[in-house]
Amino acid sequence: MTNDEHLSEYITAMVGGQMFGLPILSVQDVFVPDRLTRVPLSQPEIAGVLNLRGRIVTVIDMRSRLGLEGKAPDGQVMAIGVESRGESYGLLIDSVGEVLKLDDRARETSPINLDPRLARVCAGIHRLEGQLLVVLDVDRILDLGPASMAA
């Protein structure tokens, strides 16, 4: 038995001063979005679409999706590419961090006092030194149906 069997890897991202983790197996790439085309009458979370290496990618503004105000501190944004149900998505974030290997046994369920907007898309938390890592559930982030819009 190896110690790796209880480890998961997460790529970390900052959005509105909060650190989030996306399971690395869900992440296809990290890129700087270029030539974003707005989609008329789309939901507020949809920042637009872009062509990324020949694929049309729907870009989701994570600040809007998580109910956070404002723009990235320096105006520079990055995107994390994910895929779901055969569609490509880019998640707009403030900055990308490092890849962390964390013990699954240390992951906690969402605390009861976690903001409901975060709790909707949270798959658990890790308490790191001086910071809380909110693990995101990619499928819940991409669920932009009417039920998720109620909040």
Image: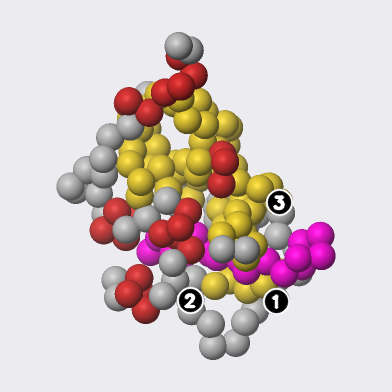
Give the vertical position of 78 relative to 50 (above or below): above
The residue under label 2 is 44
The residue under label 3 is 31
Residue 64: x and y, percent? 45, 66
Mark 1–mark 3 Cα distance, whole angstroms, equals 16 Å
What amino acid is found at the position of numbered circle 1 in the picture?
Answer: Thr
- Locate the C terminus and report the quarter of the image it occupies: bottom left
Front position in the image: 28 or 96: 28
Mark 2–mark 3 Cα distance, whole angstroms, equals 22 Å
Horizontally, is 5 left or right of 57 in the view?
Answer: left
**Residue at left offset 25%, top offset 49%:** 114
Point out the residue furthest to the front here. Answer: 1
Front position in the image: 151 or 56: 56
Horizontally, is 73 left or right of 56 in the view?
Answer: left
Horizontally, is 50 left or right of 120 in the view?
Answer: right
Which stretch appears magenta? 51-67
Q: Secondary structure at mark 1?
A: loop
Residue 62: x and y, percent? 49, 60
Give the vertical position of 106 relative to 3 (above or below): below
Residue 121: x and y, percent? 37, 55
What amino acid is found at the position of numbered circle 3 in the picture?
Answer: Phe
Asked if residue 80 is among those painted magenta in the image, a careful observer would answer no
Point out the residue furthest to the left here. Answer: 112
Circle 2 residues within 10 Å: few <14, some 14–19, many ≥20? few
**Residue at left offset 32%, top offset 25%:** 105
**Residue at left offset 77%, top offset 62%:** 52
Can you tell which mark lies on residue 37? Answer: 1
Mark 2–mark 1 Cα distance, whole angstroms, equals 14 Å
